[in-house]
Amino acid sequence: MIKGSIVAIVTPMHPDGSLDLAAMSRLLKWQVEEGTNAIVAVGTTGESATLDVNEHCEVISHVVEQVGGRIPVIAGTGANSTSEAIELTEAAKKAGADACLLVTPYYNKPNQRGLIEHHRKIAETVDIPQILYNVPGRTACDMLPDTIHTLSEVPNIVGVKEATGNVARGKEILDLCSDDFAVYSGDDATSLELILAGAVGTISVTANVVPGQLSEMCRLALAGEAEAARAVNEKIAALHELLFVEANPMPVKWALQEMGLIGPGIRLPLVELDPKFHQVVREGLHQAGAL
């Protein structure tokens, strides 16, 4: 079971929107050195929706190669087409990923039975550990706790990233599912409380810019040291909000650019963070010790 601080890493790009794999290598080196426990490659924060299949597979392979087995690599392989999700998941397995993260199908708005059949089909087709990903605010598709419970009993489906930000919802999933089914927070602002309630870690946007602090917060929370974990989280709490002042990953890519870690590239239809937000995000980075 993968535990702790798992960074949903951005996909660095050149100003023309092409992939910047050299910058990705630098980010990965830094993340490992800072104590991040695992990497999610080409999740939704990695702009999976606008990378084509070849680029998607190229980034996953690059991340696996660069990490070199030092920490686990989870490949984002979700899609709103079941056949495409299978193709990406097969490619991730071939590349050597340790697990896959599959966002619920977006736009199609399947019902709960459709979600069960979608994820069951992928799990039965590709023999690799798979983590469900529920983020209805972005997908217009909410995977309900009973559905997660049903899917938790499918071989290969080993966990869920619950990104509603509703701690009570997370607790309900924890109560429904067995102890060997991993529940991860997918909402930075509430991740500490969900870990203290029984989640095994967080798949984090904030970890892109303060990986050491996120790793330490998770370590303390998993050890039951709640007050110490809250003290660490308090120093970076502003970032949990500021990195979402516009659509993710616009703010976090701008923050990493401000930190000198990546260039300004982002894939249309997303654009660089609106200048009106620059100063407030910059102040949050200073407050967290990232600048």
Image (cartoon, helix red, strand yellow):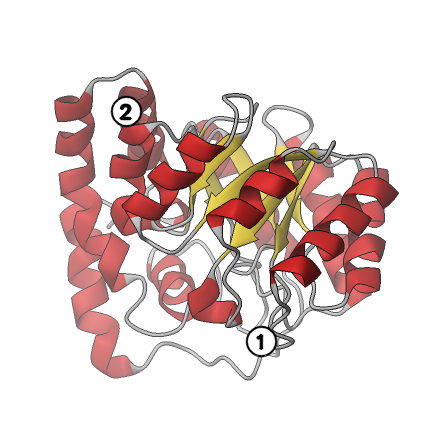
Neighbours of disc 2 within 10 Å: few (<14), some (14-19), many (20+): many
Contact between marks 2 and 1 (CB within 8 A): the answer is no
Q: State the residue at coordinates (44%, 53%).
A: 261
- Label 2 belongs to which residue? 221
Frontmost of labels 2 and 1 is 2
User: Residue 145: image x %, image y %?
Assistant: 48, 47
Image point 12% across, 24% down: which residue?
227
Residue displayed at 86% across by 40% down = 94
**Count of numbered tags:** 2
Within-10-Å neighbours for mark 1: few <14, some 14–19, many 20+: many
Residue 246 location, quadrant: bottom left
Q: Is residue 194 left or right of residue 202?
A: left
Q: On the rendered structure, is 2 left or right of 190?
A: right
Q: Mark 2 is on which residue type?
A: Ala
Task: Give the percent coordinates (x, y) of residue 256.
Answer: 39, 57
**Towards the viewer: 114 or 268:** 114
Q: Nearer the viewer, residue 172 or 37?
A: 172
Q: Quadrant of the N terminus?
A: top right
Q: CA distance from mark 2 to mark 1?
A: 36 Å
Please tell me the numbered disc located at residue 267: 1
Can residue 28 be seen here? The reply is no
Residue 17, percent across and down? 61, 75
127 to 247, vertically: above or below: above
